[in-house]
Image (spheres, grey):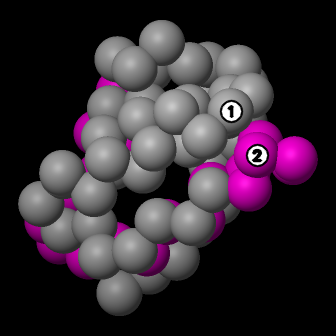
Amino acid sequence: MKTMTINVRGMSCGHCKSSVEDALKNLEGVTTVEVDLDTGKVAVTYDEAKVEVTDMREAVENQGYDVTT
C-alpha cells in the first residue's frame, strides 16, 4: 500500500468532500480517503498494482474539481 496527497481546488462544502471521497473510494485499489476542506488536500491510500495516479486524478476531475501538483 502507498499513501499520497492530492491537491484539489474547488472544494468548499460537505457535498464537495463527499463527492471527492466517493469518486476515489469507488476505484478498485483505493482503501482510504481523507479530505481536508481547509487545505484542499486529499490523502489517499491505495494499492499501486490496482490503480494508477492518473485514474485518481481523472476520478476527481470528473466530479468538477481541479487537481494541482
- Measured along the vertical axis of the image, is residue 48 above or below residue 28? below
Identify the secondary structure beneath mark 2: loop
Does the CB distance between marks 1 and 2 fall below 8 Å?
Answer: yes
Which amino acid type corresponds to the residue marked 2 in the rendered image? Leu
Identify the secondary structure beneath mark 1: loop
- Measured along the vertical axis of the image, is residue 45 above or below residue 1? above
Q: Which residue is mark 1?
A: 13
Q: Sequence-wise, which precedes: disc 1 or disc 2?
A: 1
Local packing at callout 1 (Cα closer than 10 Å; few below 14, some 14-19, many 20+) is few
Q: Which residue is mark 2?
A: 37
Residue at horizontal 30 percent and vertical 76 percent from the top: 31
Image quadrant assignment for residue 67: top right
Name the outermost residue toward the front: 14
Nearer the camera: disc 1 or disc 2: 1
Q: Is residue 35 left or right of residue 33?
A: right
Q: Please state the horizontal and vertical placement of residue 7, each as a whole percent of the image.
A: 71, 42
Which amino acid type corresponds to the residue marked 1 in the rendered image? Cys
